[in-house]
Every structure is written in structure tokens, then in C-alpha cells.
Amino acid sequence: MVRPVSPLSAARLKRTVRLGIKSLWLHRLRSLLTVLGIVFGVCSVIAMLAISEGASFEAQEQIKNLGSQNIILRSVKPPEEQKVSDKNNQSYVLQYGLTYTDIKRIEATIPGVTVVVPARIIREYVWNISRRVDCDVMGTVPWYPQMRNHRVTKGRFFSEAEMEEKANVCVLSAEMAEKLFPLDSPMGGDVRVGNGYYRVIGIMGPRSKSAKTDEPPDATQSQASGADRMFIPLETAKTRCGEILRKMRSGSFEQERVALHEVTVKVSKPEEVVPVSGAIQGLMERHHKKKDYEIVVPLELLKRAERTKQIFNIVLGSIAAISLIVGGIGIMNIMNIMLASVTERTREIGIRRALGAKRQDIIVQFLVETVMLASAGGLIGVVLGVSIPFLVTYFAKMITIVTFWSPIITFSISALVGVIFGLYPAFRAANMDPVEALRHE
Amino acid sequence: MGSVTVEALRGVSLEFHQGEYVSIMGPSGCGKSTMLNLLGCLDRPTTGRFVLGGEDVSLMDDDALSAIRGARLGFVFQSYNLIQHFSVVENIEIPLYYQGWPEQESRSLAKELAALVGLEKRLDHKPFELSGGQQQRVAIARALVNDPLIILADEPTGNLDSVSGAEILKLFDDLTTQGKTIILVTHDDDVARRTSRSIRLRDGQVETDVRRRV
């Protein structure tokens, strides 16, 4: 009896593939032209995705730089206590606001919190010999500039070592440096605050307009020109100025004890800002009986981030759709050429059928050819599509991101589509009457 | 568009024996081709039966017919019908490929058969690099490679000059002496005279069926 053979056994399939490659190679130019559509389709999908992904990343990054991941906690004088201070009681020390324990609690209990920047803001006069500026002296930590995306333009910010040894160093805001040292360079100069002298080691850059949107109107800033700031190490501020602040303003006199005026909490993703701020709110409510703090969330920035994301999703979607249409035309082209090839090879099909090829043998033969055409096109497209973003990055200096799945998906789609669109020509070839096929000229 | 039923063969009952060398003759339209298609399992009879080596072919489905063609039959065509982009050896191998032979075995058998028809030096040539007689010899080697029950030849010398034609017929003579069964369709009385049995068809019926000693 005749033994049945499947055309899909590994050895035969290997041979079919080899023969298929041979037959495609025989018409190299035609094969190349046939797959051109798929090449362009796959290539443009990958390249466009990479470019727009890069652009989206860049936009997101810019928004992040504006501080959309920061949650700011501020000490606020509780309203009912204000009445007490009106009594002008000299021995009375008003105590409120954020404490160091709050920071520890936040760090310990809330996941997703990256860095916590505590800051102490003391309103003081800062002197350079006879020049005086009313400013906020801000005791903070060395990583404050990164956290708030506020750059040091000249010199440097103070280091952790300086913080530890409570060094008398300070960094001035650009506006303040201008006021205190109008003629010479402030670098290396000394400024006086109260009884202490501080060496100027750096100047902060001016805050850009867009960056300021992150800074909601806050008490300290609205009072005076908010740009006048002097940064000193937090530890220095603690020892130099003490915990109790005396304020003498227009005849009134008050004392208050505030451990920390401002704490910046950074979360890893802009999406987490709202839930984390909720968690902080809950935590604070539990430990602060009085409402002596406020939580500031950069909602406007978050909204902007959301909007940007939406726009890029639309852009990405339409680009993908256009590329798919291009690819689709390419696939139609493959099917068209395969149909032509089937007609052209009618005689060959007849011969093969006469010599024992079953229908499925013919189907597999043509299917393998189509799939190989499509996946060769896909492969060329992937290679081009992956290299184009590099060229774009190199020449246009644009960020491009080739996500690892885009070549995989586009390649598998082109191979899959090769199967789907190869089926019709293959079935047509297989359903030819061998007698007629043999007679075909 | 309805198709018209044409009775190409009617009431034909023939029996072929192993080792016979049969020629089928007749004017065009007499049913020769239909007969050959039936014998070659390329077509099934509308009614009636065709039993090949004990198997009723007329009841088989397409796959089984393909398998029978691949395993039991050898074809030699007037226009050689070689696959143009395959080499001589690859053309000879085709029937074995579809029977799932391992490549090495089929390759060596194909080489043997190429040697048998005198083409051992042309193994890697493509058909278009060969003369008509050589191409037909490749086709004969291909028809022999699966050790068929019947070799069906459709005017095998029709496209050849007399010298090459004579070579091919000589090859057929040799094969019959080795006990192969050959059924040959021809227009040429000289060709028919070499065979041991001549069948003449007319209008779909057997006109004469002559056996002779060679």
C-alpha cells in the first residue's frame, strides 16, 4: 500500500523551505519588488513609533522636570491660634507645623515616595556690610536643587559633609546676589544674618516662568519678593537660629516654634501624585489635631501631563493607522504577485500533481513561499525600521525610543498576514485540475 | 453556462498485463487523451471502473489518487514537462520527494537513474541546457525513479528528431525487456510496430486490439 506522507513533517518542511527560497531567489528582483510594500509598512511603523515615542518621552520628561511629581507640604499657622498671638503675650510660644517625626512617618509608611526634602524657612535680614535684603533664609538639604529642578548656575550647592558639620555656607538666589553684590562677584564673599556670617559658595539660576507654575502662591513668597532666597544647610539653620523664631513686625512681637516650614515629597510617577497625597493627608490628619499644615499638589501640571499624553496617543494612533494602510497595500501586492505566480506556474503545478503531489503539498509549497516573502520583507523592514531612528537621533538630535515589542509585533504580523493572504493563491493552485494544468501553455 | 457532457470513451473494456508494451493509436478526438488521463489516475471515470494492481482507482479521492500516481505510475510527456528551475537530478527526484523519501536516498537513486539514461555527466544542468532527446531521457529517468507499475508515455517522440526519437524508443525497448509495463500513445505507425500490442481507438471505442510477437 502507498504510505501516506504529511507535507508538514520537519524534514520535508525544511526541504520545502529550501526549495521555496530557491524559487524566490530565481526571481530575486521580482521578489524584492513584491515585498517592498511590506518593507515600507513595517519600517514606517517601527520608525514612526520610535520617533513619536521619543517625542512623547521628551514631552513627559519636560513636564516631570517642572516638578509634576512633587507634593509640597507647608506649615500653616492654624487660624484659631492667630487670635492667641494677638494677645501679644511675650512668654507665649506658638507651636505648630510640620515636625521631623512627620518626615520619618511619611518615609516609613508611604510606598512610592522617593526623596523627602525638609526645609526650614526663616524670614531674616541678610547683610553685606551695609546692604540689607529682607529675605527667606531657607535651611534645607543638599539634594534640594535636583528635587525642585532649580539649577545652580554658579559655584555649587552645599554638600552633605557641610550639612553634617553645620558649616556656615550659603547659596544665594540670582536676584538676591544682584541686590547684595551689585558690583563684584558674590562668590567667596560673606553675608551676615543676625550674628552669623555665611560664605557664599553658589548662585541659583533664575526660576523660569513655567517652573513657577509649580510653586503655588504661598505665604512666604507673596509677602516679599519671593525670589529673594538664601539657602543654608538645614543643620546649620537648626543650630544658628534655634527652634524658636521671634518675629518683630510693626510693633507686634510674637514667638513661634516651627520645626519645618516646608517638606517636598517626590513620587516616582505623575500618576501617583494624587493617591500618595491622599495617603499623606490621612497620615497627617491622624497625628495633627490642628490643621497646621497644607498639602499642595501640582494639579495644573498633572492636567498638562495628561493632556500631552492624550495628544501623543492620538498622534501615535493615527501614525500607526497610516502605516498599517501602507503595509496593507504591501500585503495586497504580495497576494497579487502570488496569484500571478500561480498562473505562471500552472504547468509546474500540473507536473507536480502528476508526479504525486497532493493538494496539501501544493498548498504548503505556495504558502511557504508567500510566508517567506512576507517575513523576508518584514525582516528587512525591521532592520530598516530599527536603524532609521538611530539616524534620526544622530542627524536631527531627536530622542527616539525603539520599544522592544514593536519589531517583534510588526514582524509577526507580517508573517501572519503572509499566511492569511498566501492561503487564497495556494488554494487556487491546489484546486487546479491536473489534466488542465498539464495542458496549460 | 452549462457544461456539455462529452462521452470521450464509451464501453471500453481493456486489460493490461505486467510486462506488456502497448501502443494506443487513433485520430485526434478518438479518446486517446481521456484514456491516458484515466490510466494515469489524473481523472476518474464518470461511470465504470479502473483497477490498478488490485486497487479500484475509480473510487479513490484526490489525495489517494495523488499517492497512487506518485507511487505506481510514471509519466513521459510529449513536451517533456520538466521543471525548468530544477536541475536534472532534482527533476528526477520529484516523485520521491512527494513520497517523503529522505533526501540522501532519493539523491543517490536519482543519480543512478540519470546514469541509466546516459546523463551521468549532466546531473546539475538545467533542462534548458539540454537537447530535446536529453530532456526526454531525464523525463524517462523520472518516470522510472519510483519503480512504477505502468509507464505512461504520451507521444514521447513527437517533439524529437528521428535520431533522438530512435534513442528514446531504444530505451523503451530496453525497459520492456527488463519487464516494465509501458503504455504509449502515438500517431506514428513505425512506433506502434515496435510494441507488442496495438490498440486503435475510434470515436471513443476500441476499433482494433492486436497482439504481436516482437
Image: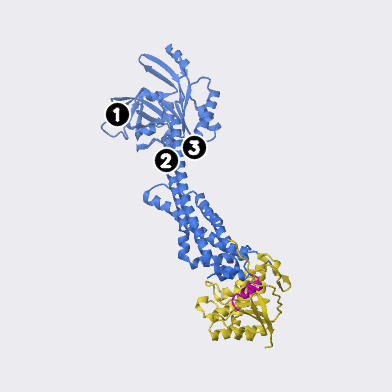
Looking at marks 3 and 2 on the same chain, the residue that comes earlier in the sequence is marked by 2
Quarter of the figure that contains the N terminus of chain A: bottom right
Work out how far the residue at label 3 is from the one at label 1, CA to CA, in angstroms: 38 Å
Q: Nearer the viewer, mark 3 or mark 2?
A: 2
Looking at marks 3 and 1 on the same chain, the residue that comes earlier in the sequence is marked by 1
Measuring from the top left, give residue A318's x and y in whole percent.
45, 45
Answer with the quarter of the image where residue A199 lies: top left
Q: Which residues are magenta?
A: B27-42
Chain seen in yellow: B
Side (left or right) of A74 relative to A127: right
Vertical side of B189 occupied by A340: above or below: above
Looking at marks 1 and 2 on the same chain, the residue that comes earlier in the sequence is marked by 2
Q: Are marks 3 and 2 on the same chain?
A: yes
Q: Which residue is mark 1?
A: A179
Work out how far the residue at label 3 is from the one at label 2, CA to CA, in angstroms: 14 Å
Are dots 3 and 2 in contact, CB under 8 Å?
no
User: What's the residue at 50%, 50% (across, down)?
Assistant: A406
Q: Which residue is mark 3?
A: A269
Secondary structure found at label 2: helix
Vertical side of A431 occupied by B117: above or below: below
Does residue A29 show up?
yes
Q: Is residue B132 magenta?
A: no
Secondary structure found at label 3: loop
User: What's the residue at 45%, 65% (across, down)?
Assistant: A29
Q: Which mark is residue A59?
A: 2
